[in-house]
Amino acid sequence: MADIARVMADAGRNIISMREFVNVDENRFFIRLEIEGNSSAEELRQAILAALPADTEIVVNPSPQKRIAVLVTKEYHCLGDILLRNYFGALQASVRCVIGNHEILRPITEKFDIPFHFISHENKTKRSFEEDIQNTLQGYEFDYIVLAKFMRILSPEFISHFQKNIINIHHSFLPAFIGAHPYRQAHERGVKMIGATAHFVTNDLDDGPIISQQIIPVNHAHTVKDMVNLGKEIEKSVLAKALQLVFEDRVMVYDNKTVIFEN
């Protein structure tokens, strides 16, 4: 801590917020600083690296305003929430484009003056479909890809181009009910609560580092349709919370877990 404080002082930076966490079991130390000042972000990063052990991982985020590309299929609730927050400046990011494998969500997207690109998955190989998405994404600068109910499984090849930069909303309280139709799985199992999970995407299906989760109670009287409708509300809420945490640089990923400094 003293070394970090000295680097900040030498760089003319003021520390306005500091949070730390020590994982004793794994011998890991995490720290998040909010600082102000005018020194170069890269120069500051190099100065911190020089003062700390060689295996230290450091990320300096000079700009709080993130840019995102959104991938969708047919369901509107998560996309609609993102577009509304973006319109009113409450997203803490700017939506650069929306890409859908169906045309259904084009009208709502274009109502907010956001470019919509239709890329069909039909009559294509997975590789060809994903190459078309990548080619479209190359026309935009963005920090994260948000899967707002994008109901296609991405290949390891695609994911490898955007490591730790793809955020998904899954309609179950992971690790329960991974894959397709989790509400049907939950109904068949007779669970007493359902949930939603926002996580970073990895090669393992619905098994990436978890960012945010919520649950709500259900009972024997709820049908699968009831669960789907209830789930839509928490899916929006969980995704919005996860995006806020990520866009505010409050999430640190290590192994397959996260450390989150919420305040």
Image: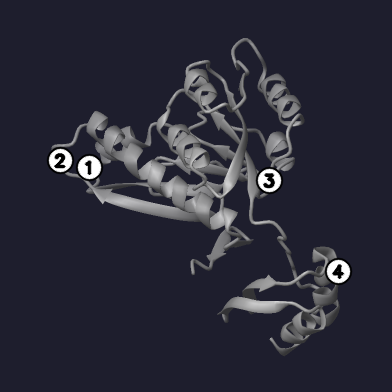
Q: Is residue 22 above or below residue 205?
A: below
Image coordinates for residue 260, horizontal then vertical, percent: 53, 65
Amino acid type of disc 3? Asp
- Asked whether the viewer can see residue 81, the reply is yes
User: Residue under circle 3?
Assistant: 143
Q: Is residue 255 above or below residue 71?
A: below
Structural distance between the alpha carbons of marks 4 and 1: 56 Å
Viewer-nearest of discs 2 and 3:
3
Q: Which of pointers 4 and 1 lies earlier in the amino acid sequence?
A: 4
View extreme (bottom): residue:
2
State which tag comes first along the sequence, 4 or 2. 4
Element under label 2? loop
On the image, the x and y values in percent for residue 115 come to 62, 25
Circle 4 residue: 43
Residue type, numbered disc 4 = Glu
Q: Residues within 10 Å of mark 2 (few under 14, many from 20)?
A: few
Camera-near label (3 vs 1) is 3
The picture places residue 122, in percent across and down from the top left corner, at: 59, 12
In percent of the image, x 49 and y 21: which residue is there?
105
Q: CA distance from mark 2 to mark 1?
A: 7 Å
